[in-house]
Amino acid sequence: MTTTARLHIDVHLPADHAQRALRADVIAGLSERPRTLPPKWFYDKVGSDLFTEITRLPEYYPTRAEREILQQRADAIAFHTGAATVIELGSGSSEKTRLLLDALTRNGTLRRYVPVDVSADALTDAANSLFGDYPNLTVHGVVADFTEHLHLLPDSPGPRLMVFLGGTIGNLEPTERAAFLRGMRDSLRPGDHLLLGTDLVKSPSVLVPAYDDAAGVTARFNRNVLAVINRELDADFDVDAFEHVAIWDDREQWIEMRLRARGPQNVYIADLDLRVALADGEEIRTEISAKFTPDRVRAELGTAGLGVRHWWTDTAGRFALSLSGR
């Protein structure tokens, strides 16, 4: 736990949480077929830097589109919510959130920011970067897995605005997504709001290049998950022996990222004493990224007990922010 005059951090994860979770995910995902790995393991230092590079690529529109909406609508969000507390799930560096914090500061209501992330260092760095620009802001960080620990959010002054940006909701399987939306709804009090970012269904000619760019940055990002397993679990994946694949599944309405074996692969993961034999062309699914229609967003939020009150898109209609409440 970290406490200063303006910063308090609650830690709800043990020091070995990441290692134990990685071991469990690798055993479960690579021991069964089809083989899978969760996308959260992309984001070591190398992976995070690669993703930052991805967000600047001409093919990758979501970050720019979401930022455009926030630039245009942050004051409206502040007006409609009057939020005293912003709770951000998966906060990372909190860069886009500054647009909301600025608007709520202008609105005269902002008092507290509650970022939730698995990294205490990331929370501390983000908080310290905010203090100079927001002299009246207090930060109550929470080191937790937001898919499991919403019930551990600290009590904060209301009304509160819960924020889940970046289209990350699309990385969850439908049943996981439904449970997570219910969990967010249960964490809100009357008068609170949820601001949710969702990527919208569009032509595969736009979607696929966003996950398979011409410069090959996303391919390096995808293969980096194998480098993480090599380093953390003493595995011997030949990272370059896997081809990056991105496909649009029209039935499920999501992008899948996969790693396809170029020739037979025999991998030994020493820390798990696990041998994994992959046939030529066999694939490991590393990410789904679901895309949504407006009706689907409203239906899934409605099933969770949340009503959409406002809906905004970027000028090109590629991405949406929805504001809902209990």
Image (cartoon, rainbow, N blue to C red):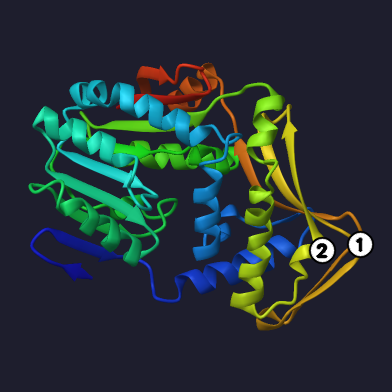
Q: Amino acid at mark 2?
A: Ala
Q: Position of residue 287 (x, y in %)?
A: 64, 48
Residue flagged by tag 1: what amino acid is it? Gly
- Between residues 194 and 125, which one lies in front from this camera angle? 125
For the image shown, how many numbered marks are present on the structure? 2
Question: Residue 245 vs residue 305: left or right?
Answer: right
Q: Nearer the viewer, residue 280 or 208?
A: 208
What's the residue at 33%, 53% (across, down)? 116
Location of residue 140 in the rendering, given as x and y in whole percent from the top left corner:
20, 55
Q: Look at mark 1 in the image and give the residue it sits on.
A: 263
Above or below: residue 167 compared with residue 16:
above
User: Which residue is painted at 52% across and 17% down in the image?
Assistant: 295
Q: Foreground residue, 290 or 236?
A: 236
* Residue 259 in sight in this render: yes
Q: Is residue 44 above or below residue 139?
A: below
User: Where in the figure is residue 90, as x and y percent of width and height?
Assistant: 40, 50
Q: Give the mark nearer the N terminus: 2 vs 1.
A: 2
State the quadrant of the N terminus. Answer: bottom left
Residue 98, image x, y percentages: 27, 40
Q: Quadrant of residue 205?
A: top right
Which element carries disc 1, helix, strand or loop? loop
In the image, taking residue 54 as reference, residue 187 lies left or right, namely left
Q: Give left or right: position of 26 versus 93.
A: right
Q: Quadrant of residue 321?
A: top left
Is residue 31 shown to the viewer in this render?
no
**For the residue labelled by badge 2, is the local secondary structure a helix, a strand or a loop?**
helix
Quadrant placement of the C terminus? top left
- Drawn side of residue 248 relative to residue 89, left or right: right
Q: Are marks 2 and 1 in contact (CB under 8 Å)?
A: yes
What's the CA distance linking mark 2 and mark 1?
Answer: 8 Å
Classify mark 2: residues with Cα within 10 Å, few (<14), some (14-19) or many (20+): some
To which residue does mark 2 refer?
A: 241
